[in-house]
Image (cartoon, helix red, strand yellow):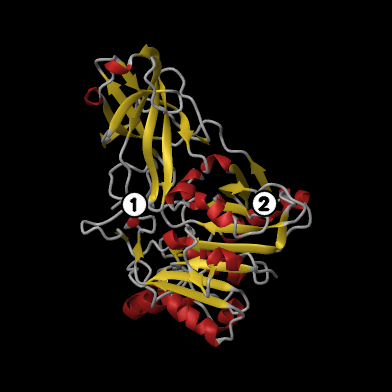
Amino acid sequence: MAGFLSNLGNILNTVSSIASSASGQSLPEKRLSFSKELAPQPREFVLYVGAYDWGGGTFAAVINTGMMVNPADVHKEDFQVSVVTISSSSLNSAIGITKGLRQVDDVYVSDARGNPTTSTTPFITLRFPVGPEVEFSDPFCRNILNAVNDLFGLRIVNERMNLNITKMTGAVNALASEFKFNTLASGGISMQYAYWNPQPSSEKVPLVIWLHGVTEGGANPYVPLFGIKSVNLVSEQIQKCFPNGASILVPQCPSTWLETTSVDPMGFRIWEPIDVQGTIKKYAGPLLDLLSKYTSVQNPMGSTPDGSPIGSTSYYTTALKSLIDYHVATNPNIDPKRIYIGGCSAGGYMTINMLLNYPGFFAAAFPTCEVYVNNKISDEQIMQLAQVPMWFVHARADKTAKPPVYDEPTVARIMGAGAREIHFTMYEDVRDVTGQYKDADGNPLIYDGHCSWIYVLNNDPKENGITLFEWLSKQSL
């Protein structure tokens, strides 16, 4: 299975007042970008990437040979395609670490868009297999420590035809091409984000904020769009749930939302899932007490200056809120009374974190396989969460974010606090919903139990005949 499956404040009054502490700027031009359609330049190729439940998948490459090619002269066995790790700011695979060979399913002469032709043209299309277990299917290198988001480029060689194609003109994906991008610098933190707006109408539209998981952070906002199929938020499947559509905002954390404002004795920021006052206190309490007694470091068993538990408030809390405020202020068609926030895994934690830090701002939330440790949420905070319409989604088979540690007890406490409106969809496992991927016995392929965002981004959760996004569209402050 693909590697990633197992890995783990108020609105400011005017745009000018926001700009005084946060500035927006465009993304650098020299980087991979996606188009609805694109012709390769001579001696270059265009990558065709699909967005699938399990991540991005490169299914084709169209090369411009720079010479006229007769279909009879093209043979699959003459091509060798190497996968090369390249920088996200580079589109050339001439230099880079070769990771392996990409399997080629088919090769044929085509037009510039990859359509087969019997005519003589300079274009050749190569087709690749894609799937959750196909090596190097994903064009993005994603792991927790890869904050620069390297790419898997291609080196296409055909010695008989004297071809050595390493430079990429760009990539094609229709939904990804509809997004716009920006960068916001606030409080010393620079955060990139992708956004999309529906066709203008006389009515204001809601804003749906989606926060990615732990392996989609970094400095390439296409990674969260493809890594968990966030592009589907602009599809007809989800947009039709809102009368006039919904604006979409997908921020990218520079590292991970899980980094908190608390630091360990070595000066490193503590990650939220580490339950310092629970498991760690039980086994390491005496040693840490001794360390605190003879050093000036923050006592890991205590609380932060604001009284919250150690390792609970995200380091990126204020920066994300500034980004949201800036985006709302610069997109006047967004209804500030209908701002919804959701996210998966680390993004689910950040969803809860934002609700706790900015009460009364969000109209509804949909945390998915969230990893906010229940023991870190006080009874007072539970009362606060009970005022927000929420729809939790998880899978019983999740071994990464075990429901009994995270959302199960949290939801029970919220319900006990007289929740205004709360829903909880608990699946037994996470399995393919497309019908395309099956196991050896012909049954739907079962993914890692942590990947319940697959259900959310396919709008599968349903209660009393109402889907999650249909329910979301009815929420307002």
**Which label is found at residue 198?**
none
Nearer to us in this view, 477 or 299: 477
- Look at label 2 and name its amino acid: His
Give the image quarter of residue 153.
top left
Tell which circle, 1 or 2, labels the residue nearer the N-terminal end: 2
Q: Position of residue 294 (x, y in %)?
A: 41, 72
Q: Secondary structure at mark 1?
A: loop
Image x and y of residue 415, in percent: 53, 84
Residue 317, given in percent of the width and then of the height, sits at 58, 61
Residue tagged 1:
436
Q: Residues within 10 Å of mark 2 (few under 14, many from 20)?
A: many
Towards the viewer: 44 or 305 = 44
Q: How many marks?
A: 2
Position of residue 179 relative to residue 119, above or below, is below
Q: State the residue lying farthest toward the front.
A: 118
Q: Position of residue 98 (x, y in %)?
A: 28, 33
Residue 318, by quadrant, is: bottom right
**Which numbered tag is attached to residue 327?**
2
Q: Which quadrant is home to the C terminus? A: bottom right
Please give the name of the residue rendered at 50% of the width and 70% of the height, measured from the top-left corner: 462
Q: CA distance from mark 1 to mark 2?
A: 37 Å
Q: Tell whether 408 sits left or right of 12.
A: left
Q: Is residue 404 visible?
A: yes
Residue 465 located left or right of residue 289? right
User: What residue sits 54% from the left and 50% below the top?
Assistant: 235
Q: Looking at the picture, does residue 65 appear above or below residue 454?
A: above
Mark 1 belongs to which amino acid?
Gln
